[in-house]
Amino acid sequence: MTTGVDLTNCDREPIHIPGSIQPHGCLVACDAGAVTILRHSLNCGNMLGAAGNLNGRDLASVLGAKTAHDIRNALGRAQLSGRSALMFDCALENGRRFDVAVHRFKGSAIIEFESAEANLAAPLEMARAMIGRIAAIDSVERLAKDSTRLVRAALGYDRVMIYQFGPDGAGKVVSEAKRADLESFLGQYFPATDIPQQARALYLKNTIRIISDADFERIPVEPVLDASGEPLDLSFAHLRSVSPIHCEYLRNMGVGASMSISIIVDGELWGLIACHHYSPRTLSMAERVAAEMFGEFFSLHLNALRHKQTLDAAHRAREALDSFLRDTVGSHDINGLLRDKLSQFAGLIPCDGVAMWLDGQMSVVGSVPPEAAILALARFAETVADGQIWATHKLANVVPGAEDYAPMAAGMLVVPLSQRPRDFLFFFRKELVHTLDWAGNPDKTYETGPLGDRLTPRKSFAIWKETVRSESAHWTEQERRFGEATRIALVEVILQHSERLADERTKAELRQRMLNEELNHRVKNILAVIRSLVVHPTADGETLENYAASLRGRIQALSLAHDQVVRNDGGGALRDLLHAELMPYWGDGERVTLDGPAIWMDARAYSIMALVLHELSTNAAKYGALSLPTGRLSVTWSLTPVGGCRIAWREAGGPRVAAPARRGFGSVLIERSIPFDLGGDAAIEYRPDGLEADFILPSRFVALRQAEAAFTNEELPMVDRHDNLDLKGKTALIVED
């Protein structure tokens, strides 16, 4: 069946139907009911003690009625998937004893016989101890390292390796326990072609495979084809012979026997526990069962640890992103923050370097391509990363000239940072073979068989290196998910920042318009107040000189009030603000009364209240209580139960009041400034006997504290108080603002 198989067609070799078995056992194939023998290996006569041609004979006549009955019962226990049921120390009618494996596959009952092993308990105890030793291991690396040592100690092979398959099918030795005089294969890679696809398919079906002697003589199974022309499928048979090419590979390395245990994770072939011995070695069926049990537990434990690693990595990535998101709160320069955090992004996904192309500027950390190449990659990313992450393990396949900088960056994962393809975060990985060296003795030579030196570990490694030139390690599905999570988080932060800036710009523009209107309105009001001061009737007999002095004092008081509003950027006391605004209308000190605790307003509330109180004061002077000598104004304030400030403005004794027919800017300013800018309340009532206004400032803008008043009731700078000052011989400094 192996005639004509060579290195050019070994990937198509039908290894599941070799037509032969290994010589350390024998095999018979019966009908589905295990009644009649249809095929047998040519060594059955010697091993079973049955003379002549067995095909066509009743199974019971060859093995004995009891043994045939036990085999049919075992077939009933065998799984439909093809996995064998086992019978240990089974006695034939002639007294010979065997360990028997039986399974049913594709309509045939296949029965395998191997010499019985006397001590069955020892392998089971061995498996139990090995499983107990690895059950508490909490890392994949430790699991692999300890398992190779345990398998070698238990089964006695010269070398035990754990061989992991990559996404491209190539393999890597991730753990090794060996005889001291052997060279090491640890860390070495081998091409996918070393284990063809049909062999991998069998590793999934039959989780353990043994070669007792690399020089074994194949024992034919006859007939090769049944009456329908079908060969016997030995996919699940323990004794199935193996490819002559694989045997030559083993012989070229000096290996005399081998065993492989499949490592299956989530239904996929993750790797192998590969055992080599440098002389022939046969394991008993009980030992193989123990190894198979250990392999299955190893696979389950590995799967659990890999899921734990994924969760831990996701948790670390989430914590890193959360930390970054916290740092963005209140940041006014999100681009600068992203650049400052670039080194932290490198910890989200395993990589050798990170680059960020943001708003036309480049930032890099670690091993990255040259700057000119990154600019070209940014332009390339615009064509492939349209709102989604994009990755390649071989840039040279998609970007011309990328092989020139492959030692620095052979693979790339792109994370878009904007809805339009403009800003990007790049993760880079170096060329995989850039720092790899053969771990063993460089002078070591291997035998070369008739198929050439291709079938040696060193040549395989060289072929793998040539195959993956200009390639990086593959980006896993987990790493792609982390990249997508990073993209979502960063895009959201950038969008929120843009929205916040847009909102602030809108508010700033609105405040600017109000400020311009207020400035215009206030200038008019100031002129109106000055006009009212100028035309204010003088007392009988008052001289022009006294009138001019009084007028100068009133204008000075008005200037002082406005200066107080402009200069108090850090906030101020409510009483001081009222003094400053009402000073020009204070008169003899009895027209205006103020009463309330020492309330301090922050800069925002102080500014808003300055506008409102100035408007109220101006209106009171022009149209309200302060426009007549008989008018009175009372302003009281107090703290609310929730810590806010309630202000009551009461006018009396002035002209009769009526609601204005047209609401001008001043009325809008009084009614809306506090609700709009501070989130407080404002209410105005135009009572016939005087205007009443009530305001509430929220607690976050006010505080109760003892602030120094700019003026007290007893020390108000009356405009007439300084008329008799003697300034003769004094020097004055006049500063105009």
Image (cartoon, grey):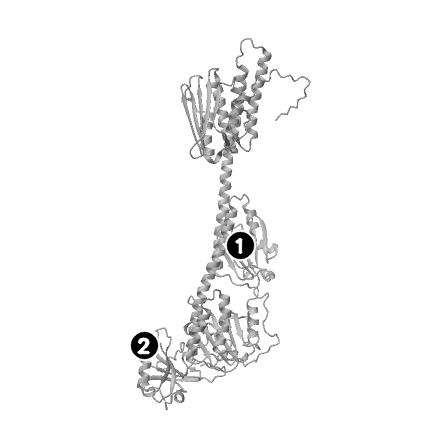
Q: Which quadrant would the C terminus be assigned to in this image?
A: top right
The reply to whether residue 416 is in sight is yes
**Residue designated by label 1:** 381
**Left or right side of 687 for 164:** right
52 in relation to 272, above or below: below
433 in relation to 493, above or below: below
Say which of 294 and 351 sits in front: 294
Identify the mark nearer the N-term, 1 or 2. 2
Give the mark toward the camera: 1 or 2: 2
Mark 2 is on which residue type?
Gly
Under circle 2, the secondary element is helix
Say which of 200 and 613 sits in front: 613
**Residue designated by label 2:** 76
722 in relation to 27, above or below: above
- Counting the numbered discs, the total is 2
Instruction: Name the residue furthest top.
Output: 541
C-alpha span from label 1 to label 2: 60 Å
Q: Residue at x 34, y 88 (%)?
A: 93
Q: Which mark is residue 12?
A: none
Under circle 1, the secondary element is helix
Say which of 661 and 15 sits in front: 661
Q: Determine which quarter of the picture holds residue 222.
A: bottom left
Residue 20: image location, x then y, percent = 43, 82
Instruction: Name the residue furthest bottom.
Output: 51
